[in-house]
Image (spheres, rainbow, N blue to C red):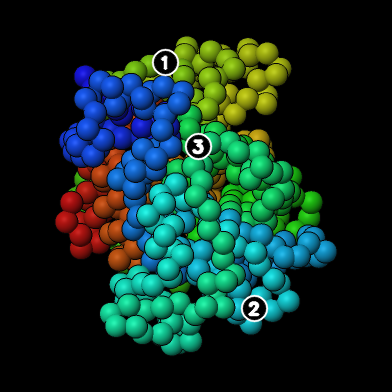
């Protein structure tokens, strides 16, 4: 069908990915472009597929297909991290580099780039001149950015004092201060196209590429990230959208977590304000108190009655004694060892065949599963999939000190291993460090938003702390994720519970916090 060819051509030319739910939208766009060009469908799509696809038509499609919703000071936590952490770090690392260069990739109508220009005039950045460039594939949006005229809706998160200082009313529009406008340059660029004259090595100190990668197919997103990495100075920073992560796209970045937000620093930094993962977590947002809240009512048989308010690790220990009856509730699923690879490191296949090990774990033959790992060649000691399976088996065996040590080794190899962060959270809870447990859960949930267990654990921690609002929020999210969680990952990280057992636990905890499952 022509619509399928059209979708493939859009992906190839603009890098945009549209699932089956967007086919009606694509069909409407195709009809409009056929009417505008006067071409028959076969000829029109054929031109897009060819090597000489007309540039004016690609620009017209970019107008139709790209998302343009944005506003000033969107996700203010990231701007605080920029001004209070990232830029000071860059100034210390390279005091002779002036001005610092910031790229707003996918800048749309300019709100993000102009927010950066406004921040450049703040007292915190005195003596730190910034050069700001915004790029976008949509020429209509760039025209709006150049006009710098906005509605009040675009300033809905902008502090009133900044509105009064940098905007003047002109009818129903608000016009940006001319000096701020001069600080930003805009260029029409397609992130999918590798232009070496623009993507020069070490061209930028900071790159904002927010809510862009999510619209690309994985291979396109990986290529774009490689381009951004190349153009970033050693130790430079990348800010992504809240729903985006580098996991599965690049191993070239440290994950940073300060000011209540996540962002990334290129790995080959020499020195700077940040250390490794434990220091990265030091400024993570935490609940005000982690003293135990009032005991929650029990309404399930899965939770043993030995302790009045057991921790999740205590629950796991009890459940392992009854693992056969509990895991029989799980939905039958795949048993191939490469499921670990699909969830923990999507970019590569496992170096070792772990199929038999995972099958033994499914049969609760944990001793035999551990023995299969011991028989692997010495180079398996650097394979994160193998190490993660070892850590899971140690957790099942209750040796949490060894689990945490092994997780540290995994995170040294792959800082964005959601499984290793989650297991570390269990270890921290068992050591009565609930703050540390919550920190690692939050990192796990960030690097893999589909992972249900860190959300469930956060909900349990918050409920025990008496923070019922946070508990309800996390448990509702966990409940939704559990319904579609991968079977193999439930086997590895479910603590002996199957899908239905975990859902029942989550529902009971939610009711105990005053929520509705």
SS type, badge 3: loop
Location of residue 207 with respect to 424 vertically, above or below: below
| 233 left or right of 42 in image | right
Residue drawn at point x = 23 percent, y = 25 percent: 41
Name which of mark 3 and mark 2 comes first in the sequence: 2
Q: Position of residue 14 (x, y in %)?
A: 42, 36
Q: Pointer 3: what residue?
A: 192
Location of residue 403 with respect to 258 vertically, above or below: above
Q: How many marks?
A: 3
Q: Nearer the viewer, mark 2 or mark 1?
A: 2
Q: Could you tell me if the residues under marks 3 and 1 are in contact, i.e. CB atoms within 8 Å?
A: no
Location of residue 206 with respect to 382 vertically, above or below: below
Name which of mark 2 and mark 1 comes first in the sequence: 2
Q: Pointer 2: what residue?
A: 124
Whether residue 68 can be seen here: yes
Q: Position of residue 289 (x, y in %)?
A: 45, 70
Looking at the picture, tell me which residue is in the foreground, 332 or 4: 4
Q: CA distance from mark 3 to mark 1?
A: 34 Å
SS type, badge 2: helix
Q: Pointer 1: what residue?
A: 336
Residue drawn at point x = 43 percent, y = 70 percent: 148
Looking at the picture, tell me which residue is in the foreground, 198 or 143: 143
Q: Position of residue 105 (x, y in %)?
A: 51, 52
Looking at the picture, tell me which residue is in the foreground, 317 or 305: 317
Q: Nearer the viewer, mark 3 or mark 2?
A: 3
Residue drawn at point x = 56 percent, y = 78 percent: 179
Q: Position of residue 272 (x, y in %)?
A: 75, 59
Name which of mark 3 and mark 1 comes first in the sequence: 3
Q: CA distance from mark 2 to mark 1?
A: 53 Å
Q: CA distance from mark 3 to mark 2?
A: 35 Å
Whether residue 289 can be seen here: no
């Amino acid at each position: 069908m022509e619509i399928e060819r059209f979708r493939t051509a859009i992906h190839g030319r603009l890098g945009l990915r549209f699932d089956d739910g967007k086919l009606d939208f694509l069909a409407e766009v195709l009809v409009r472009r056929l009417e505008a060009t006067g071409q028959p469908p076969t000829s029109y799509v054929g031109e897009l597929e060819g090597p000489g696809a007309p540039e004016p038509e690609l620009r017209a499609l970019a107008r139709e297909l790209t998302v343009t919703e944005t506003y000033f000071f969107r996700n203010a936590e990231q701007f605080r991290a920029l001004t209070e952490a990232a830029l000071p770090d860059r100034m210390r690392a390279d005091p002779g580099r002036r001005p610092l260069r910031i790229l707003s990739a996918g800048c749309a109508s300019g709100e993000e780039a102009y927010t950066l220009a406004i921040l450049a005039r703040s007292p915190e950045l005195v003596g730190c001149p910034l050069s700001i460039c915004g790029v976008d594939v949509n020429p209509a949006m760039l025209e709006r950015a150049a006009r710098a005229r906005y509605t009040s809706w675009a300033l809905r998160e902008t502090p009133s004092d900044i509105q009064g200082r940098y905007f003047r009313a002109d009818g129903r529009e608000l016009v940006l201060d001319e000096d701020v406008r001069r600080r930003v340059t805009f260029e029409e660029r397609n992130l999918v196209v590798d232009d070496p004259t623009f993507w020069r090595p070490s061209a930028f100190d900071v790159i904002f590429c927010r809510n862009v990668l999510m619209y690309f197919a994985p291979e396109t997103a990986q290529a774009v990230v490689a381009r951004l990495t190349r153009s970033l100075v050693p130790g430079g920073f990348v800010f992504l959208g809240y729903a985006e992560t580098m996991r599965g796209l690049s191993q070239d970045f440290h994950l940073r977590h300060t000011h209540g937000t996540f962002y990334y620093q290129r790995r080959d930094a020499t020195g700077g304000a940040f250390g490794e993962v434990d220091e990265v977590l030091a400024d993570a947002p935490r609940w005000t108190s982690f003293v135990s809240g009032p005991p929650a009512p029990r309404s399930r048989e899965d939770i043993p009655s030995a302790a009045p308010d057991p921790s999740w690790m205590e629950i796991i220990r009890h459940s392992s004694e009854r693992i056969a009856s509990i895991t029989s509730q799980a939905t039958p699923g795949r048993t191939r060892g490469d499921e670990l690879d699909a969830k923990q490191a999507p970019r590569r296949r496992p170096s070792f065949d772990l199929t038999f090990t995972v099958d033994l774990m499914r049969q609760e033959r944990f001793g035999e599963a551990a023995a299969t790992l011991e028989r692997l060649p010495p180079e398996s000691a650097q394979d994160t999939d193998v190490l993660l399976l070892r850590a899971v088996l140690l957790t099942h065996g209750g040796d949490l000190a060894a689990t945490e040590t092994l997780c540290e080794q995994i995170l040294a190899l792959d800082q964005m291993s959601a499984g290793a962060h989650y297991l570390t959270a269990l270890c921290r809870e068992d050591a009565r460090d609930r703050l540390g447990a919550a920190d690692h859960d939050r990192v796990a949930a960030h690097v893999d938003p589909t992972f249900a267990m860190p959300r469930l654990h956060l909900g349990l921690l918050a409920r025990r702390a008496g923070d019922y609002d946070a508990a309800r929020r996390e448990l509702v999210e966990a409940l939704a994720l559990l319904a579609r969680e991968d079977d193999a990952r439930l086997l590895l990280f479910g603590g002996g519970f199957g899908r239905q057992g975990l859902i029942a636990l989550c529902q009971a905890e939610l009711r105990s916090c005053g929520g509705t499952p």
